[in-house]
Image (spheres, rainbow, N blue to C red):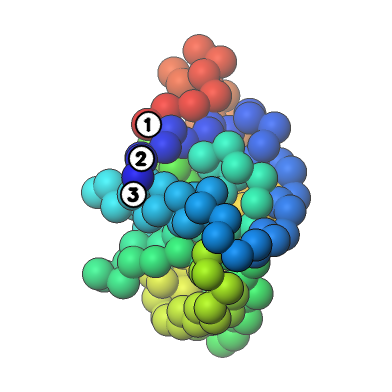
Amino acid sequence: MTERQIRLFGDPVLRSVSDPVVIRPGDSRLAALGEDLVDTVLLPGRAGVAGCQIGVGLRAFSWNVDGDVGYVFNPQLEAWGEPELVDEGCLSVPGFYFPRQRHPHARVTGIDAAGRTVVVEGDGLLAQALQHESDHLDGHLYIEGLEPEARREAMRAIRQADWFRAGVTSAS
């Protein structure tokens, strides 16, 4: 369908808890949303895109890790294993990577636009992406999970970023 623009840090939609998706037979808007999420995540360097990042306040996200591409509505996250420090970035906070704790394994269970069960499970980058996108649906950005000193550094860097100083709230 369409690649959608990414909302940037400071946009209120990123801080809002997303609403559950209600599946209605024949609802072409949900199929279009799934396609838009996939089209948007297919750009190089993208591992995941949450609905709120494209301005849609619904519990939906897409992923694109090592050739595994898809989308899910109403995901329920399970994550396990001893948390590890990993470098993490976000399309809504462009140009920055900071170390934060993530579980090494994760699984998401949800549905697609037709109401069929979707299960995606992985470790490493896929596990990190599933956790990251699930956080977005609860109105949280990855920088909230940083250690205090790293978070102060992140906020300093964000405030100095050209895109933030320009007051821009979306970019492709």
State the residue position of label 1.
172
Mark closest to the chain's N terminus, 2 or 1: 2
Mark closest to the chain's N terminus, 2 or 3: 2
Q: In the drawing, does residue 32 fall left or right of residue 137? A: left
Query: Given contact means CB atoms under 8 Å apart, are the residues at marks 2 and 3 in contact?
Result: yes
Q: Amino acid at mark 3?
A: Asp
Q: Quadrant of the N terminus?
A: top left
Residue 35, percent from left and from top: 40, 53
Q: In the drawing, does residue 137 fall left or right of residue 63? A: right
Q: Secondary structure at mark 3?
A: helix
| Front in this rendered view, residue 3 or 11 | 3
Look at 42% across and 81% down and name the residue there.
Answer: 122
Instruction: Report, in whole angstroms, how far the alpha carbon at label 2 lies from the one at label 1.
Output: 8 Å
Instruction: Report, in whole angstroms, how far the alpha carbon at label 3 lies from the one at label 1.
Output: 12 Å
Q: Can you tell which mark lies on residue 39?
A: 3
118 lies above or below 58: below
| Front in this rendered view, residue 67 or 147 | 67
Instruction: Report, in whole angstroms, how far the alpha carbon at label 2 lies from the one at label 3.
Output: 5 Å
Look at 49% across and 26% down and name the residue there.
Answer: 170
| Front in this rendered view, residue 115 or 135 | 115
Q: Secondary structure at mark 1?
A: loop
State the residue position of label 2.
3
Look at 65% across and 51% down and name the residue there.
Answer: 58
